[in-house]
Image (cartoon, rainbow, N blue to C red):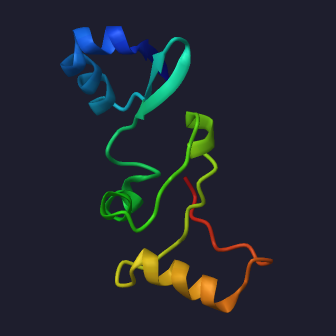
Amino acid sequence: MGSVSVREFSYDPSGMFARVEQGETIEVTRHGKVIAVLLPGSGTLGRYADLVAKGVIRLKATTTSDLDRVPQYAVPADISALDVLLAERAEGSSSSTPPRSSP
């Protein structure tokens, strides 16, 4: 994982996106504080990108290590991930651990 300042990012945004396309995660900082995280389009969060874009779910991550703790659910291709999450919420099964897929 790399870290760049806003100024450095503004000098070469295409270069930063090229690094992300190669699989690198980049934290963008202002005055030493992380203000954005650039993630590759696929991977752990790729499955949820549509839901995030639509505003159905919102991820609150402060560092890339927080993103590693996002649960990964084993969801069959013919079932919506949102349906699985809503069904689990309706069951109130907060004490049971959902099935996780391997990274």
- For residue 17, side relative to residue 24 (left or right): left
- For residue 49, side relative to residue 83 (left or right): left
Q: Position of residue 81 (x, y in %)?
A: 44, 75
Residue shown at the point (37%, 65%) measured from the top left: 51
Q: Nearer the viewer, residue 21 or 103?
A: 21
Does 70 sit above or below residue 86? Answer: above
Q: Nearer the viewer, residue 51 or 43?
A: 51
Residue shown at the point (47%, 16%) measured from the top left: 30
Does 23 sit above or below residue 96? Answer: above
Does 51 sit above or below residue 77? Answer: above
Q: Position of residue 18 (x, y in %)?
A: 24, 24
Residue shown at the point (34%, 84%) measured from the top left: 78
Query: Which quadrant holds residue 32?
Result: top right
Query: Which quadrant holds residue 68?
Result: top right
Which residue appears farthest toward the right when viewing the image? 95
Q: How many marks?
A: 0
- For residue 55, side relative to residue 21 (left or right): right
Residue shown at the point (62%, 42%) measured from the top left: 66
Q: Position of residue 17 (x, y in %)?
A: 26, 26
Q: Nearer the viewer, residue 83 or 29?
A: 29
- For residue 3, side relative to residue 39 (left or right): right
Q: Position of residue 8 (x, y in %)?
A: 33, 8
Which residue appears farthest toward the bottom when viewing the image? 91
